[in-house]
Amino acid sequence: MSAVESYHSGREDFAALLEESFGQNEALEGSVIKGIVVAIEKDMAIIDVGLKTEGRVALKEFNGPGRDQDIKVGDEVEVYLDRIENALGEAVISRDKARREESWVKLEKAFEAREKVSGVIFNTVKGGYTVDLDGAVAFLPRSQVDIRPIRDVGPLMGQPQPFEILKMDRRRGNIVVSRRTVLEETRAEARSELVASLEEGQVIDGVVKNITEYGAFVDLGGIDGLLHVTDMAWRRVNHPSEVVTIGQTVKVKIIKINQDTHRISLGIKQLLADPWDGIAARYPVGARLKGRVTNITDYGAFVEVEPGIEGLIHVSEMSWTKKNVHPGKIVSTSQEVDVAILEVDQVKRRISLGLKQTLRNPWEVFAETHPSGAVVEGEVKNKTEFGLFLGLEGDIDGMIHLSDLDWNRPGEQVIEEYKKGDMLQAVVLDVDVEKERISLGLKQLGGDPFVDAGEFKKGQVVTCEVIEVKEAGLDVKIAGTDMTTFIKRAEIARDRAEQRPERFAAGEKVDARVILFDKKARKIQVSIKALEMAEEKEAIAQFGSSDSGASLGDILGAALKKATTEKK
C-alpha cells in the first residue's frame, strides 16, 4: 500500500470512529446519566459526565424542600443530559431534571400500586399548595389538607409527610395529591383498634371536645363518643352547657357501640342512682304535692316534682272550665303549682298529673248552692241554633233550650229577641255534674198557663180572642187564661165556602168547642166547625127531624128564633 493510500485509509477509519462516538453521545441526550464531581467553583459544581466533556450544575439544585445535600469533589451524582455541547463547549446538564425524571418513574409505580408517597409542602398557590415529591411538583387542593378545615398551614410546611396520589398526567406534568385520605385511613385504623378495645357498659374518662344543641362530643383517646343531652342527667336539661364545658374531663359510661359505623353513645346519668326506682310507693294515686313548671307545650305542661322526676299535666286536666285554651295561658314556666297524682307508670317512666283536681268541681259547688227551682242571673255568652248560654258564677255556663224560652210561642221566634251581653234571669231546671251541664229555663219564671187555667173537658165551649189571622188559620187565646192555640182553616166553619180566615180580625172574639185537651202533653185544640155541628145536632134534636117533613132550614130557623127570644 502506498503512503497516499495509507493516509486515506486512516482518515476514513478516524471519521467512522468519530461518527460512531457522536452517534452514541447523541443517543444519551434527554436521559439521566451518572457523573463525577471534579471541582466546585463558588456556587457551581463541575461534573465530568464521561463524554470527554464536563457540565456545570448550580449547588442549589442539590438542595430542596425537606432535603440538604453536601456535595464535595469525588461524589458520584445523577444528572439529566440536555445536550452534549453548548456555546462554551460544555455539556448542558441538570440535577433538578434528573431528580424529576427519576421521581416520575417512582411516582407512577406508586400510583399504580396505590402506595403512599413522601412529600413536603413548600408553597401556597391559588386553591391550595404545592408539594415537592422528591423533585416532582404536585398540587395539594385546600380541601385535601386535613379532615377538618384548618386556618393555618404554616406548621405543616417544610415537614416531610405521607401523601396519596389522586391523579397523574405525565404529558401535562400534572400531579394531584391528598393528605386528607392518608389521615382518614390512619384515623380509621386507629378507630377500629380503639373501638375493638371498648365494651358496652364500660366506664371511661373522656374530654369534652365540642358542644352542640343536642349533646356533647367526648374524646375517648382518639375516637369521639356522643353524650346526648337526654343522657346527661335524670332531670330535664335544656342545653348541654348546663352540665358540661369544653375541655372538661368527665367520667362516662359506654351505652352502645356500633361496630359498623364506629359510633359510640355515652351517658353520665347512668352512673347515678335512678330516681324512678320505687316511684309508685313515693307518689300514690290521689296524693297532692307541689311542683315547678319546667316546660310548656301545646298538649300540656311538664312539672318537676323532685330532681330528675317530671310529670305531665295534660291540657284536659288543667282547668274545669277552660277547655280550648293554650296551657301557657293557665300556667307559666318556673311557676310553683299544686298538683294531684292521677297515674304512675314506672315502666314507661310517666306520671300523669292534674291541676284542676286540686280545686273543687265548680259544677258540684253550683249544684250544692243552687237546687232545682232556684233563680239565677247571668249574661248571654253565646247564642246558638238550639238555645242561649248564660255565664254563671264559678266561670261556668248554663243553657236555656229553645223549648224553655216561652210557653206559647216557638223558641226559634223568641230567641231572636235576645243578643250577646243581655242580662237575664232564669230558673235552674237540672244540674248534671258528671256531664258538666246546667239546664235553665226562662219561661218558668212566670206561671204555667196550663196549670193556672185548670181543667178543660172535651166538648166544652170556650170563648177565644183572635191574636193573629194567618192564611192557614187563626192564632187564638182562650179567654180568661194565658193559653194559646191554633184553629186550622178547616176548623173555622162547617161550610167550606165559609172556611176563610180573612172573615176574622185580630181582637175579635169567637166561640169554639174543645176537641182535644192533654194536660201532660200540654196541648189544647178548639174548633168553630165542631161547635156549629154540635149546635146543629142539638137543634135537630129539639125542633124535629127531617123524617117528620120539616126541612133543615125550618129547623134551624126555629132554633134561631128560640135563641133570639132567650137572649131578649
Image: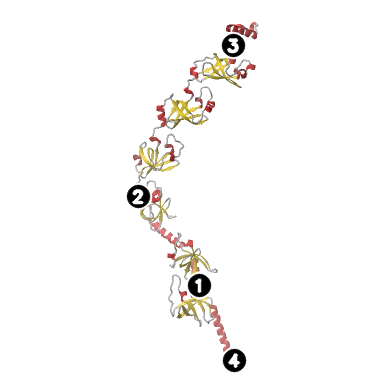
Label 3: element kind: helix
Label 2 close to label 1 by CB (< 8 Å): no
Q: Earlier in the sequence, mark 1 or mark 3?
A: 1
Q: Nearer the viewer, mark 4 or mark 3?
A: 3
The amino acid at mark 3 is Glu
Asked if 360 appears above or below 77 in the picture, the reply is: above
Q: Which residue is mark 2?
A: 271
The amino acid at mark 1 is Glu
Label 4 close to label 2 by CB (< 8 Å): no
Are there few (<14), some (14-19), or many (20+) residues within 10 Å of tag 3? some
Query: Disc 3 to disc 2, how far (Cα)?
Result: 105 Å
The amino acid at mark 4 is Glu
Query: Disc 1 to disc 3, how far (Cα)?
Result: 142 Å
Are there few (<14), some (14-19), or many (20+) residues within 10 Å of tag 4? few
Q: Earlier in the sequence, mark 2 or mark 1?
A: 1
Label 1 close to label 3 by CB (< 8 Å): no
